[in-house]
Amino acid sequence: MTAETAAQGQHSLKFTDAEGLEKSFNPHLVYGPGLRSGLAVGTFSIRVEEGASFYHEWRDSSNPYRVGPSIWFDPDGSIRASGQAVAKAPLGTWIDLRISCPLGRAADGKYDLTIAIPDREAVELTDLACGSPEFNRLNWYGFVSNATHPATVFIDDLNLRAESTRKAELLSVEKIWDQGGHNAFTDLIRFNDRWYCTFREAEGHVKGDGKTRIISSADGTAWESVGLLEEEGIDLRDPKLSITPDNRLMVVMGGSVYRNDELVGRQPRVSFSEDGTNWTAPQRVLSEGDWLWRVTWNDGVAYGVSYNINSGEPLEWRLNLYRSTDGVNYEPVTKFDIPERPNETTLRFLPDDTMVALVRREAGSKMCWIGTSEPPYTDWSWTETDYQCGGPNFIQIPDGSLWAAGRYYPGGAKTVLARMTTTSYEPVLTLPSGGDTSYPGLVWHDGILWMSYYASHEEKTSIYLAKIALE
């Protein structure tokens, strides 16, 4: 870091090359973003001094690695992209670059480049060829000073993000249930060509003997009750649906116990159905104090995160990742090292078996965290986002992009849909909602995103179903 010069502010990153280095690629800076979907956009400012040889390149983690965008800066100020000369920048002058390249299923082996040089018209290039036509994920984001003699390059204002190439449009939203006193905390799934939506019915947001209602529909319009799970003295809440490897519907629920309006205990419950109508009695899983908030099946194994609050001082909220082959008996995988009261967590799997976690937090900045891990899911990389997310859920649609939903507070509680990557979360659509709201279920069906959620903007807390186009 140096204060000699900067594109913005007072500091920049300085690369100083020298003679006699054992490796010509030193010095270099590499970041492993792990981006796998969406439109990756990288921007930075660079100042190349006389005699410098420098390049910026994107690669995946294959062996041998595959190259995406590749930008070279020659000693005379010439700039080459994908092997061809595209511009010449004045030495000792700050210039700005923007590179965008689709990843995942949207990848086409091409990228766009914009070069902004002071007092000149910007150079805008499209459909440049990636170094490898198969490049479709970004695991290595590098800046390399490649000279074999003394030379200097400065870098500033680095930014890398992934943007969805789709836009969200609300097609419709309908109230589908309001028969309970307080109807809340939904989930949604397709099972045997029918829709199933589950939620809690009670007299209020917390306390009381909450019951888990399951309703079903053939077309998403006409709904009927197909199950009501209840347990005397237990508040069954936050039900979540999944399909077991042997094709049964499974619902996991929190089971809270209140005495004189005070929480005195809790333990998760599960219930199963072969036909979506006949359900087993709620069965306890894990241990007293746990709250297994959702399970996600992958290759015959259910994974879920339970949060547990200790009773000592200081108060500690702990997250533990568990696995199960039957949905009933669980074994620990790892603990999540996340500060500031982490709790509700949704897990999903990318096609390469990378596990992605979206985690709500209740203290400090309260911004949600996103984590990624490869099998066996014991080592995690975490990113703090710029937004809160209550009742978090997310889904990967066929083009590889991630879409999330939850509670946000843009001047009051609202349920929102958000663009998501493995390192970012950005609300883009606010659903008709307000007050007590959120806890969405998400299903991609017939090219439409279907989303269940609850809200109280029409006075009574009720269950809604939205259809959203992602174009």
Image: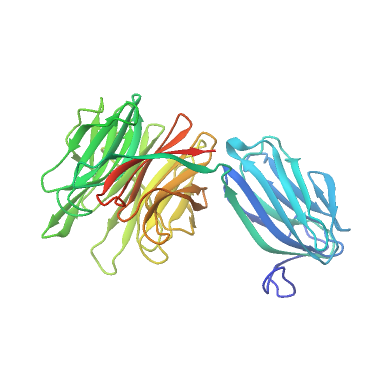
Q: Is residue 148 left or right of residue 294?
A: right
Asked if 339 appears above or below 224 in the picture, the reply is below
Q: Nearer the viewer, residue 79 or 218?
A: 218
Q: Is residue 456 visible?
A: yes
Rendered location of residue 431, percent (x, y): 41, 48
Rendered location of residue 67, percent (x, y): 70, 42
Rendered location of residue 210, percent (x, y): 18, 47
Q: Is residue 166 left or right of residue 116?
A: left
Q: Is residue 82 left or right of residue 225?
A: right
Q: Give the colouring mode of the picture.
A: rainbow
Q: Is residue 466 visible?
A: no
Q: Is residue 170 left or right of residue 230?
A: right
- Residue at the outermost front position: 458
Rendered location of residue 348, percent (x, y): 43, 41
Question: Could you say which quadrant of the image residue 389 lies in?
Answer: bottom left
- Residue at the outermost right position: 76
Q: Nearer the viewer, residue 246 or 79?
A: 79
**Where the N terminus falls, by quadrant?**
bottom right
Q: Nearer the viewer, residue 283 or 166?
A: 166
- Residue under the image location 71 percent in, 56 percent down: 143
- Residue under the image location 58 percent in, 42 percent down: 165
**Where the C terminus falls, by quadrant?**
top right
Q: Nearer the viewer, residue 81 or 427?
A: 427
Asked if 400 appears above or below 267 in the picture, the reply is above
Question: Could you say which quadrant of the image residue 39 lies in?
Answer: top right
Asked if 243 appears above or below 403 in the picture, the reply is above
